[in-house]
Each structure stands twice: as structure tokens, then as C-alpha cells.
């Protein structure tokens, strides 16, 4: 009678806990997604440079070789690969939680069946009621995933694994873009150094001429000093460029995961092909191609299933423990089949009582993380669109600027010839000659920088469109 009432009480308790768990409110609905533009600044290209493989996008064989080395040896990329393996292991663990565990067990026990009787008690040990118990067999444990808690955890770990793969793609795009950026930076510095050395040779010739003119009384010591000072300034500028070249080469070698060494290149940046037309496609394709947006989306999905798993923690959990093997009260007869064969199962239920605060705190934290992941996803979309439009504008503007700088350089080169001719005829001062030489040097360096910036802008646009990871 008492046992029956006890079972009824236990049943009522679990019903109350189940009803209490059902009172948990649904997670709040997240705000609607941002309406994405249909085009990039009105462009209606059907294709995009982001669809091109990086081996096809870059046509410089030396750059392609450098990128290949970086993809094999870059330490950041290798670290990301290990993060993927860690995420894969977490997913395998959560997937295994849905399956029952099976152990081979041997258990032996010695104890008293009843309280010791006075007449059979020797030194506090009951001889007649002493019991031995042995079991050898298989023991299993399985939690019934009634509320989907384990399945939600598995899905969350699966999407985190996918996010880690997108993290690899993201690292790859940045690595490819950074190697290309540094390579074109190096080509630009090479051309600047050639320009400076050419001007050094011209200025050395001009200095020797002004010295001869001074001897002939046609120039003053001040003119010689001015030409000499200009030469020294240009020579020091050449040393600065050489130092900068060493630094950029070292930066490239770090990206390639190797110690400092010379970087092979043989084509001037002025001879590199600059695309006349750059196609960007439509924003919707960018969403499926950019690794950072896809990674943020996978994290958002994972956080959603984390919320579902945290919500299921409020409900009771049910376990089944089957067993099968041989059992005997004497170790010598434990293998006597079929008398010693035994099998059965034990069921159990566990409901949280004093851990509601911890479970609710974990649930609230999961909701907060879900909101954070949602906002990060929206921010990744906004950032992607901003990077594409900004890079697209830079490509168009730098192409136009380069065209103007090219014309400026040509005009100033003619001005140098004119200044020299006028100075020889006595119609211009030496200061005008110096000014013309300095202006053409600055214009040539500026033209090279603009050419380099135009290439870097195209690389940034390629990366912004999601290209470079395949």
C-alpha cells in the first residue's frame, strides 16, 4: 500500500515537472533581415570577377608561384586547419551522444544479506548470511532524446564545423589578397627605384655641367650648391626605397612561412595588364560567395540550435540501461550456462529541481548569443556591400587618376627639356631647371603609386566579391 502511494507520488512529481518545463516561453523572434540592394551602384553584370579562380585571375607567373607557396606553408592557414579538425571532433562527439554506449563489465561484491544474528556472529561478521555476487557481461546506457536536446546539440556542432570550414576559406581569401597586395607593392617600389636612379644619373650630369659653367663664369657657387643638394636628396630617397623593398620582401616571406630571401619578379608594374572592364555581378551572388558572410550564417544556425538544446534542459531526461551476461554467487560457477545467463534493463528518469537557476541562466545566455550572431550576420552583409562599392569606386577613380598622372608626367618631361634649353640660352634661371627636375621626379613617382593603387583596388574588389578561396 505504501509502495503504491510512493509510485503515485513519484508519477505526480514528474507530471508537475513536465508541466513546469512546458511553461518555458518560446525564444524571442529576431527582427527581420535587411533588404539587400539588387545591384552594385546600378551595375547589371551577369558575371563577376569573384567567380574566377585565383589562378585565372592573376596572370603573373611569379605571383601565382608565391601564392601557391603561401597556401602550403602559411602558419595562420595551418592553424585554421587545426581549428577545423577540432570542430570536426566536437561534431563527432555530439553525434556519438545519440548512440547508446556499450561496455564490457565484471563486477564482484561481498556483503551481508541480513543483519548479523548473535549466535552466528564471529568477531562482528555474519557467517551464515554472508553473500557473494558476481556479474560478467555487457552493460549499455542510452538517453532517450525525447525533447530533441541531443539532436539540437549535434546540429549546433555540425554548423560550427561548417563555420570553421568557412573560416578556412576566409583565411585563404585574405592570404591570397595580401600576397598579391604586397607583390604589387614590391613592383611599385621597384619602378620607383628605377625612376630615382634615372633621375640621379640626370642630376649628376646636370651638376657636372653647372660646375663647368661656374668655371666659365656663367654660374655661381650658389647654383652648384643647389644642384648638389638636389642630387643628395634624390640619392637619399633611393636608399629609403631600397630599405622599403627589403621590408616588403620580408613581409611576403612571412606570409609564405619562410625565412627572409629574395622575391623573384621581372615585370615592371607599368607593363602589367590592368583590366579595362571590371564585372561585379549582383549582391545576391556575393552573399553565397563571401566566406565571412557564410561563416556568420553558419554561426547563426548553430546558435539557434543551442537555444533549442538549452530549452530542452528544463524537461526531464529518460535513460534506459540494458544488460546481458552471466551471473553467479560463486566465481567458479559463473560460466555454467544456461543457469548463469541473465539479461534485463533498468529505466530511469532525471528531472532538474535545484538547478533551475543555472539552466535558465544558460538558456538566457544562449538567446543572447543567438541575437549576437544575428546582428553579426547582418553586419557582415553590410560590410560586404560597403567593401564592394568602395573598391569598385577606387578602381574606376584610380584608372582615371593614372590617365591624368601619365599626361602630367609627359608634360613635365617636356618642361625639363624646355628649362634646360632656356637656361643654356640665358632665358631661365638655374632654380627653374631644378624646379622642373624635381617636379618631374615627383610626377613619375606619383604615377607609379597610382598604378600600384589601381592594382590593389582591383585585388580588394576581387576579395570583397568573395574571390580567392578556390
Image (cartoon, helix red, strand yellow):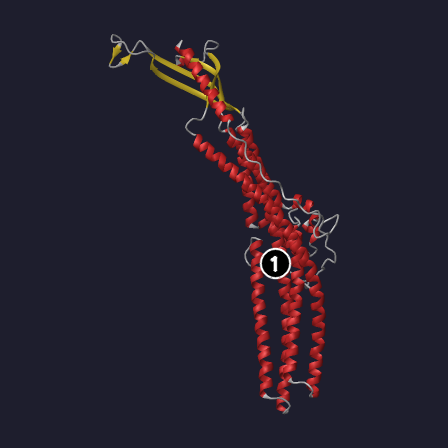
**Helix, strand or loop at disc 1?**
helix
State the image quarter where residue 226 is shown.
bottom right
Give the x, y percent position of residue 308: 54, 32
Give the x, y percent position of residue 468: 65, 49
- Which residue is label 1 attached to? 182
State the image quarter where residue 87 is shown.
top right
Instruction: Name the residue furthest top.
Output: 119
The answer to whether any part of residue 283 appears in the image is: yes
Residue at (72% x, 72% y) in the render? 410
* Quarter of the figure with the N terminus: top left
Q: Is residue 344 left or right of residue 275?
A: left
Residue at (42% x, 12% y) in the render? 5
Q: Is residue 94 above or below residue 109?
A: below
Q: Is residue 120 above or below residue 225?
A: above
Instruction: Name the residue furthest bottom.
Output: 217
Q: Is residue 277 above or below residue 117?
A: below
Give the x, y percent position of residue 208: 63, 83
Amino acid at each position: 500500500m505504501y509502495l503504491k502511494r510512493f509510485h503515485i507520488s513519484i508519477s505526480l512529481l514528474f507530471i508537475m515537472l513536465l508541466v513546469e518545463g512546458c511553461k518555458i516561453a518560446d525564444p524571442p523572434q529576431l527582427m527581420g533581415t535587411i533588404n539587400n540592394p539588387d545591384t552594385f551602384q546600378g551595375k547589371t553584370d551577369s558575371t563577376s570577377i569573384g567567380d574566377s579562380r585565383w589562378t585565372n585571375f592573376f596572370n603573373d607567373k611569379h605571383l601565382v608561384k608565391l601564392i601557391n607557396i603561401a597556401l602550403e606553408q602559411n602558419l595562420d592557414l595551418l592553424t585554421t586547419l587545426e581549428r577545423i579538425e577540432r570542430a570536426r571532433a566536437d561534431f563527432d562527439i555530439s553525434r556519438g551522444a545519440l548512440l547508446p554506449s556499450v561496455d564490457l563489465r565484471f563486477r564482484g561484491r561481498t556483503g551481508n544479506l541480513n543483519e548479523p544474528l548473535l549466535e552466528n556472529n564471529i568477531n562482528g561478521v555474519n557467517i551464515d548470511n554472508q553473500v557473494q555476487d558476481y556479474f560478467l557481461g555487457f552493460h549499455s546506457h542510452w538517453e532517450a532524446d525525447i525533447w530533441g536536446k541531443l539532436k539540437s546539440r549535434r546540429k549546433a556542432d555540425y554548423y560550427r564545423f561548417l563555420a570553421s570550414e568557412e573560416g578556412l576559406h576566409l583565411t585563404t581569401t585574405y592570404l591570397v589578397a595580401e600576397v598579391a597586395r604586397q607583390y604589387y607593392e614590391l613592383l611599385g617600389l621597384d619602378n620607383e627605384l628605377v625612376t630615382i636612379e634615372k633621375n640621379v644619373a640626370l642630376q649628376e650630369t646636370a651638376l657636372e655641367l653647372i660646375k663647368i659653367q661656374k668655371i666659365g663664369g656663367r654660374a655661381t657657387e650658389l647654383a652648384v650648391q643647389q644642384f648638389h643638394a638636389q642630387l643628395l636628396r634624390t640619392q637619399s630617397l633611393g636608399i629609403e626605397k631600397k630599405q622599403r623593398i627589403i621590408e616588403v620582401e620580408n613581409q611576403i616571406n612571412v606570409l609564405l612561412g619562410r625565412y627572409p630571401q629574395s622575391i623573384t619578379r621581372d615585370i615592371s608594374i607599368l607593363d602589367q595588364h590592368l583590366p579595362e572592364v571590371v564585372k561585379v555581378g549582383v549582391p545576391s551572388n556575393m552573399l553565397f560567395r563571401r566566406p565571412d558572410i557564410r561563416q556568420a550564417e553558419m554561426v547563426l544556425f548553430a546558435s539557434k540550435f543551442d537555444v533549442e538544446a538549452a530549452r530542452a534542459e528544463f524537461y526531464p531526461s529518460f535513460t534506459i540501461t540494458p544488460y546481458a551476461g552471466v551471473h553467479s554467487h560463486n566465481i567458479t560457477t559463473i560460466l555454467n550456462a544456461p543457469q548463469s545467463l541473465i539479461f534485463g534493463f533498468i529505466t530511469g528518469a532525471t528531472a532538474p529541481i535545484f538547478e533551475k537557476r543555472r539552466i535558465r541562466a544558460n538558456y538566457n545566455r544562449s538567446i543572447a548569443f543567438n541575437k549576437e550572431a544575428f546582428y553579426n550576420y547582418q553586419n557582415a552583409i553590410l560590410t560586404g556591400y560597403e567593401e564592394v562599392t568602395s573598391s569598385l569606386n577606387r578602381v574606376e577613380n584610380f584608372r582615371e587618376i593614372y590617365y591624368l598622372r601619365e599626361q602630367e608626367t609627359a608634360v613635365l618631361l617636356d618642361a625639363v627639356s624646355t628649362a634646360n634649353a632656356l637656361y643654356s640660352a640665358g632665358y631661365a634661371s638655374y632654380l627653374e631647371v631644378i624646379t622642373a627636375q624635381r617636379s618631374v621626379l615627383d610626377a613619375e613617382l606619383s604615377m607609379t603609386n597610382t598604378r600600384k593603387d589601381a592594382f590593389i583596388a582591383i585585388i580588394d574588389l576581387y576579395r570583397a566579391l568573395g574571390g580567392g578561396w578556390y
